[in-house]
């Protein structure tokens, strides 16, 4: 008789991986033999260019092959920046989701072939300030690529985990993440292995690509007109300045001083977001700043950062281009085998319901840790009311008309009752990936409604709403005080 004994520690998904789906490059990590390893692609690098090219027959090439052998579409680059509108057409019928799907499909099939193991589950990292549209688009692309997403993980949190900063001692860190196309700053608290994002700020249209564009614009003002040559060599010239005072290629040249002068206005934008994140977190000190993203290697950037935040320790001894993927791999492995750390992310905007007087009853407040579940009881305001209409809104203003409506639904056919006797229990849930579900249960008839809110806010709209809320804070406070006074007098 033959007896087969299964290993209780065997990964039920065969192999679970961490994926950093970056704007410029993407990486895949996996746990093998007690360590996290990075996948090397066909061109012998762990960095897979996040690019794709297509022909009219819908054939596709991705990564380095797309760069070396472009098809009719040309090489589509930085498409992650466009994922806040995932259904737009970049070239013919090609959408940002399609590009992300093809990149993920290639990563999955290539890694399976090399590792001779099936990959069905993953942790994918996203910028901490990605909104619901961008998160859902990322998750959809992974699903279309045949991957089960165990979790969408914030890139800054993954970086801290890669550094092994999940100690029992208390730390408050600033995670400064300047990638190819996006910038994030997260204020992260670590206490007894508990990761808690206190606040986040970011810009999905700010990164190393913008520094490159500013350098090219500078060369153009000097009279250079060969755009192809400038685009091909701008990054190598910028990188060479870490080794020498001046870098040259043919007629192109750039000095360290020129580079710093070019990127300083962009750097100041990141500092403004950094300062706002510190203000949102209501803290007066940091224990260190972790550098993340390839653009943080730019000559002079670290020194500028240290000059602005002079008392901080700068963590930069690990490769900022790979630490996010390593952290994702660690967390992916921990979801299967368990770990001693817990991750808590936050929601960027408040969620609530419009009341009869037009004010918003905020059920989940901005910067609440995720996942979160909150309940609120709502009642009828008039006698014999046969239904209750709900308007679910997102934003920081006091009046619903000044916020963004996410969804509307109605509880109908209510029995005639005095005002306040009908009770509807509304539950808001936001999962670890930031996706929203709202459900409502009416106590007497037992009616139940549940909806997953279709995301509508882009990053730009989210920023505009926060700016608008701060601009009108005084007006909103006066409105709220007037409302409370009327309630007290009545």
Image (cartoon, helix red, strand yellow):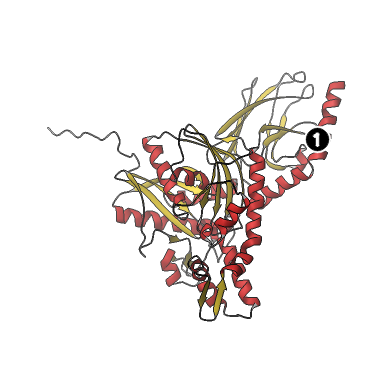
Task: Identify the residue shown where x is 64% and y is 44%.
Answer: 277
Q: Say how many tags the image has.
A: 1
Badge 1: few (under 14), some or many (20 or more) residues near its Cα, within 10 Å? few
Q: Quadrant of residue 14?
A: top left
Look at the image and tell me in which quarter the N terminus lies: top left
Q: Nearer the viewer, residue 258 or 105?
A: 258
Residue at the image point whose x is 54% and y is 44% from the top: 288
In this rendering, is residue 331 above or below 227? above
* Image position, residue 393 (x, y; %): 69, 39
Outermost residue toward the left in this view:
1
Which residue is disc 1 drawn over? 477
At numbered mark 1, what does the secondary structure look like: helix, strand or loop?
helix
Asked where in the image residue 197 lies, by quadrant, the reply is: top right
Residue 392 x/y as whole percent: 68, 37
Q: Check the image and report above or below for 48 versus 143.
A: below
Q: With 117 as the anchor, is 466 left or right in this view?
A: right
- Is residue 276 toward the left or the right of residue 10 in the image? right
The answer to whether one can see residue 148 in this image is no
Q: Residue at x 28, y 52 (%)?
A: 116
In this picture, residue 102 sits left or right of residue 354: left
Name the residue at the front extreme. 311
Residue 284: x and y in percent read 64, 39
Q: Residue 198: give x, y in percent of width and height.
A: 59, 38
Taking depth in this image into account, of 81 and 309 the one nearest to the observer is 309
């Amino acid at each position: 008789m033959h007896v087969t004994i299964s290993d209780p520690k065997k990964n039920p998904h065969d192999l679970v991986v961490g994926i950093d789906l970056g704007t410029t490059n993407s990486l895949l990590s996996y746990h093998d033999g007690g360590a996290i390893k990075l996948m090397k692609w066909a061109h012998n690098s762990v960095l897979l260019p996040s690019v794709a090219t297509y022909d009219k027959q819908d054939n596709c090439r991705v990564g380095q092959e797309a760069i070396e052998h472009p098809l009719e579409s040309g090489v589509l680059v930085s498409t992650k920046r466009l994922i806040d509108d995932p259904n737009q057409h970049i070239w013919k019928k090609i959408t940002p989701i399609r590009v992300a799907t093809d990149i993920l499909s290639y990563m999955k099939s290539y890694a399976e072939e090399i590792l001779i193991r099936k990959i069905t589950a993953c942790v994918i990292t996203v910028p901490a300030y990605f909104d619901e549209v961008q998160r859902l688009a990322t998750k959809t692309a992974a699903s279309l690529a045949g991957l089960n997403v165990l979790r969408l993980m914030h890139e800054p949190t993954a970086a801290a985990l890669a550094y092994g900063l999940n100690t029992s001692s208390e730390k408050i860190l600033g995670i400064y993440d300047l990638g190819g196309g996006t910038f994030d700053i997260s204020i992260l608290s670590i206490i007894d292995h508990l990761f808690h994002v206190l606040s986040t700020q970011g810009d999905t249209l700010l990164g190393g690509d913008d520094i490159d564009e500013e350098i090219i614009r500078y060369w153009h003002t000097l009279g250079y007109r060969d755009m192809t040559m400038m685009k091909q060599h701008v990054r190598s010239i910028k990188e060479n300045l870490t080794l020498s005072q001046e870098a040259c290629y043919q007629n192109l040249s750039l000095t360290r001083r020129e580079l710093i002068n070019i990127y300083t206005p962009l750097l100041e934008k990141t500092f403004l977001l950094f300062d706002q994140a510190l203000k949102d977190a209501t803290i007066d000190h940091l224990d260190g700043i972790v550098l993340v993203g390839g653009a943080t290697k730019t000559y002079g950037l670290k020194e500028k950062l240290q000059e602005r935040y002079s008392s901080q320790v700068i963590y930069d001894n690990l490769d900022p281009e790979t630490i996010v993927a390593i952290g994702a791999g660690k967390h992916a492995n921990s979801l299967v085998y368990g770990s001693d750390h817990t991750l808590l992310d936050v929601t960027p905007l408040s969620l609530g319901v419009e009341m009869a007087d037009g004010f918003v009853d905020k059920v989940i407040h901005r910067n609440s840790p995720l996942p979160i579940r909150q309940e609120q009881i709502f009642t009828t305001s008039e006698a014999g009311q046969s239904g209750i209409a709900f308007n679910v809104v997102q934003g920081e203003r006091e009046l619903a008309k000044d916020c963004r409506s996410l969804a509307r639904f109605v509880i109908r056919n209510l029995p005639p009752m005095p005002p306040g006797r009908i009770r509807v229990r509304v539950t808001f849930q936001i999962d670890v990936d930031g996706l929203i579900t709202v459900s409502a249960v009416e106590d007497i008839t037992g009616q139940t409604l549940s909806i997953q809110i279709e995301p509508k806010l882009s990053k730009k709209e989210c920023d505009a709403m926060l700016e608008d809320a701060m601009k009108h804070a005084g007006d909103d406070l006066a409105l709220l005080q007037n409302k409370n006074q009327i309630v007290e007098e009545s």
